[in-house]
Image: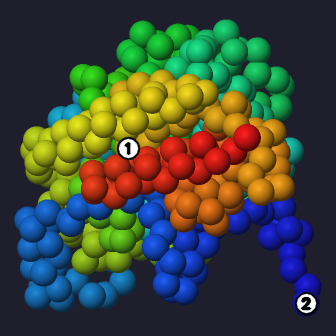
Amino acid sequence: MHLSDTLSRLSESATLAMARKSRELKEKGVDVISLSLGEPDFNTPDFIKDAAIAAIQGNFSSYPPVNGYLDVRQAISRKFKRDNNLDYSPEQIVVSTGAKQSIANVVMAIVSTGEEVIIPAPFWVSYEEIIKLANGIPVSVHCGLDVDFKMSATEFRKAITPKTRMMIFSTPCNPTGSFYSKAELAEIADVMKENPQMYVICDEIYEHINFSGGHESLAQFTEIKDRVITVNGVSKAFAMTGWRIGYIGAAKWIADACNKLQGQITSGACGIAQKAAAAAVDADPNVTFAMRDEFKARRDMMLLELRSIPGLNVNEPGGAFYLYPEVSHYIGRSYNGRKITSSNELCEYLLEEVHLALVSGEAFGTPGFIRISYAASQKDLKEAMNRLKKGLAQLT
């Protein structure tokens, strides 16, 4: 058995790994509650399904254009203008098989071997691995609970070196739910102005799951817009994770580069899913409000539960559907001779002892934390909190 050097550099997705372990236990008859995946527990809205059915009946079953059907890219262009006041022409948009592929396309199109990519930590698990795939060097900038897990302009500036090519961040953020205000983004834009060799991927996949007001995009700052790649998709806001549609808005030369790369890897995304996505992005954003409001109610309930547990520290996230408590208080404790030495081990312990699946902070670049997804029913979430309290209380 001989595997490539590229694969040896790559780690398994921690979120998918925990989901796999949960599934294996469930297959053995164990009653596991899994809060490990970032997947809405809602069904795709009927009007989107209807668009997919119409696409099937319309025989959209041939190879689509690599960058997406023109009418789909036109719909995304309208969405960018309506929701974000961003002017991306259809030629500046590339539709991909999920936002993960969108991000990978951009990184591999722009980052060369040995170039550095700044990622504020906590960060989504795949950022670091995608950078490794491109032979780039991930540079993590720690952003603590005390600053709501957000990178300041000062920290950003300090992390830049002559080798820096890119920065990647999400707003609202996975795993913390924190989001950047316009003023905070303006400070990041100012640092970008000082460093014309740099590009930024702004991952906005949780745009519509925002509990605190309007979403802000980094690309709104015109002086740096051509060096910002805006990534979005339909997975989260429209409960379409399995439809696998993401997209970018970028300078045309970047879009062209991603189109070239994608043409050699997957070609165009599923045409039927594209037509469904066009219906989603063309819809008034208020169709997402009911799901957003339910997520907020769950967040508020979960915060009350978590804040009642001794030793846990947690912020109040303004978006997405995650909580990211600090669990350092429980590191170093034991149960039945089993000592917990990391948040990784804590998550393994919780899965095995109380059958609750969470994801450790190591996966997101910040040991001592755990990510809890509240994309589950309130009934399951309440039982999950009971199991968490039991599991932590057993540690001495």
Look at the image and tell me whether residue 61 can be seen: yes
The answer to whether one can see residue 249 in this image is: no
- Disc 2 residue type (three-letter): Met
Q: Residue at x 56, y 61 (%)?
A: 354
Q: Is residue 2 above or below residue 304?
A: below
* Residue 164 point in image, percent of width and height: 76, 31
Residue 52 relative to residue 231: left or right: left
- Residue at x 14%, y 63% (from the top left corner): 45
Q: Nearer the viewer, residue 249 or 381?
A: 381
Label 2: which residue?
1
Query: Is residue 300 found left or right of 181 in the rendered image?
Result: left
Circle 1 Cα neighbour tier, 10 Å, few/some/many (<14 / 14–19 / ≥20)? many
Task: Return the residue nearer the eye: 41 or 85.
Answer: 41
Amino acid found under the numbered disc labelled 1 = Phe
Q: Position of residue 243 (x, y in %)?
A: 33, 70
Residue 1 in the image, given as x and y percentages of width and height = 91, 90
Q: Quadrant of the C terminus?
A: top right
* Residue 99 vs residue 373, the one in the foreground: 373
Q: Residue at x 71, y 26 (%)?
A: 142
**Dot 2, crowdedness within 10 Å: few (<14), some or many (≥20)?**
few
Instruction: Please give the residue where the numbered disc 1 appears in the rendered image.
Output: 321
Q: Residue at x 83, y 55 (%)?
A: 337
Residue 267 point in image, percent of width and height: 48, 75
Secondary structure, mark 1, is: loop
Distance from label 2 to label 1 (Cα)?
A: 41 Å
Q: Is residue 392 left or right of residue 133?
A: left
Q: Quadrant of residue 11?
A: bottom right
